[in-house]
């Protein structure tokens, strides 16, 4: 008889990454329990959890080998608008939950963090660089990382750059405009180092089988400006370059969230797990021409 696959708990299994990770793990024959804050989705393998409520009273499921904390308020703008309310979820409730899981005997807890913990002054930022956030969202992620460090070898941090899903609203909007022959105005001074959500799920599935107590980074191998990404997309769609009309982020009121570089060093992934992030230009082209491919579970 084959050994039963260890059970995985995904905190926030309705989100872009959590839902894809769940589908990926299930496609690999792993048993998964998720959490939702939507009452209609609650069931045997999906438990109710609202991080804005009384987390300490949450009935922690038993028999779980690894928990992945995907829930959180992931919008940079939402964090800037309501720093206290978003920190309650992204920092306080998240850390309380991780401690609750650890004290219930969970051997491994994985926290999804972000490249926003860095100021973006250097490309391919190293995993052990000093945390230097410049956005409220980044400060919250950095704060959560620091506090979670008290869990020692039970916790692993997984920092992500931009994760592209089939439903990315910005690129979907650009694609529709370009196909309609309408001009778009991408930022020339804001960059991304995107990875497809399918790769992120594949990497997370491998990471959760590794020992905890360290930091992983999942990032595209280079930075591309939003305007160059839009140009790549226009070319891939066969639309004229003149439709891409770059502007500075400040012209649209986004100066505070601009970081020059967003890429992080992912060499631990390739060296230890043999997982190389897909080519950035190809990821961008797919986002315009065949977005569903970004999410295909292989
Ligand atoms: N996507 C990226 O490019 C990216 C990059 C770097 C880091 N990350 C981090 O990765 C994690 C997952 O990102 P994502 O893109 O999947 O985000 P997402 O699509 O916005 O999903 C966030 C999830 O958190 C849940 N959530 C929000 N507030 C909650 C609360 N009070 N209680 C319980 N659940 C709550 C949401 O529930 P509902 O579905 O009910 O709203 C949703 O399921 C986040 O921590 C994010 O900061 C993402």
Image (spheres, helix red, strand yellow):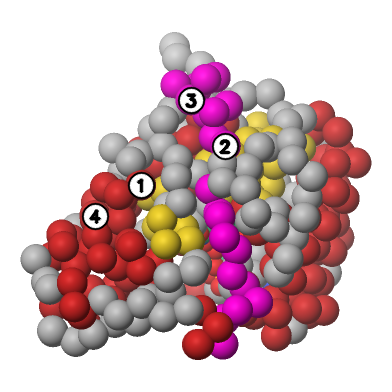
Residue sitting at x 54%, y 28%: 267
- Provide the residue designation for mark 2: 265
Specify the quadrant of the image occupied by residue 38: bottom right
Is residue 262 shown in magenta?
yes
Q: Quadrant of the C terminus?
A: top left
Furthest-right residue in view? Answer: 150
> Which numbered disc, 3 or 2, marks the residue closer to the eye?
2
Q: Which mark is residue 280?
A: 1
Above-or-below relation of 112 to 15: above
Furthest-top residue in view? Answer: 1
Residue sitting at x 57%, y 37%: 265
- Provide the residue designation for mark 4: 286
Residue sitting at x 90%, y 41%: 150
- Provide the residue designation for mark 3: 270
Q: Earlier in the sequence, mark 3 or mark 4?
A: 3
Question: Disc 3 on helix, strand or loop?
Answer: helix
Per the model, the C-alpha gap separating discs 4 and 2 is 23 Å
Question: Disc 1 on helix, strand or loop?
Answer: helix
Is residue 192 shown in magenta?
no
Question: Badge 4: few (under 14), some or many (20 or more) residues near its Cα, within 10 Å?
Answer: many
Residue 186 is situated, as x and y percent measured from the top left of the image, at 37, 76
Question: Badge 2: few (under 14), some or many (20 or more) residues near its Cα, within 10 Å?
Answer: some
Above-or-below relation of 239 to 295: below
Look at the numbered discs 3 and 4 and tell me whether their residues touch, using CB distance below 8 Å.
Answer: no
Per the model, the C-alpha gap separating discs 3 and 1 is 16 Å
Look at the numbered discs 4 and 2 and tell me whether their residues touch, using CB distance below 8 Å.
Answer: no
Residue 42 is situated, as x and y percent measured from the top left of the image, at 55, 65
């Amino acid at each position: 008889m084959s050994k039963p696959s260890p059970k995985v708990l995904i905190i926030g299994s309705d989100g872009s990454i959590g839902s894809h990770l769940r589908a990926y793990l299930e496609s690999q024959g792993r048993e998964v329990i998720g959490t939702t804050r939507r009452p209609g989705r609650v069931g045997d393998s999906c438990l109710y959890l609202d991080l804005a409520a009384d987390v300490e009273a949450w009935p922690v499921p038993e028999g779980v080998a690894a928990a992945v904390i995907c829930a959180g308020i992931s919008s940079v703008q939402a964090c800037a608008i309501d720093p206290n309310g978003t920190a309650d979820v992204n920092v306080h409730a998240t850390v309380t939950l991780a401690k609750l899981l650890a004290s219930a005997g969970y051997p491994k807890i994985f926290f999804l963090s972000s490249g926003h913990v860095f100021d973006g002054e250097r490309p391919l930022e190293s995993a052990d660089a000093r945390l230097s956030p410049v956005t409220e969202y980044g400060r919250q992620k950095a704060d959560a990382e620091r506090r979670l460090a008290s869990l020692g070898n039970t916790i692993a941090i997984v920092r992500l750059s931009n994760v592209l899903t089939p439903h990315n609203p910005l690129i979907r909007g650009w694609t529709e405009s370009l196909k309609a022959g309408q001009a778009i105005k991408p930022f020339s001074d804001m960059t991304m180092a995107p990875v497809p959500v399918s790769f992120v799920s594949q990497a997370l599935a491998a990471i959760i089988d590794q020992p905890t107590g360290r930091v992983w980074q999942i990032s595209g191998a280079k930075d591309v400006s939003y305007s160059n990404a839009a140009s790549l997309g226009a070319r891939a769609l066969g639309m004229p370059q003149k439709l891409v009309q770059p502007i500075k982020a400040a012209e649209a009121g986004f100066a505070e969230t601009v970081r020059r570089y967003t890429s992080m060093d992912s060499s631990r992934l390739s060296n230890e797990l043999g997982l190389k992030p897909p080519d950035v230009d190809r990821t961008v082209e797919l986002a315009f021409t065949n977005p569903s491919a970004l999410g295909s579970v292989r």
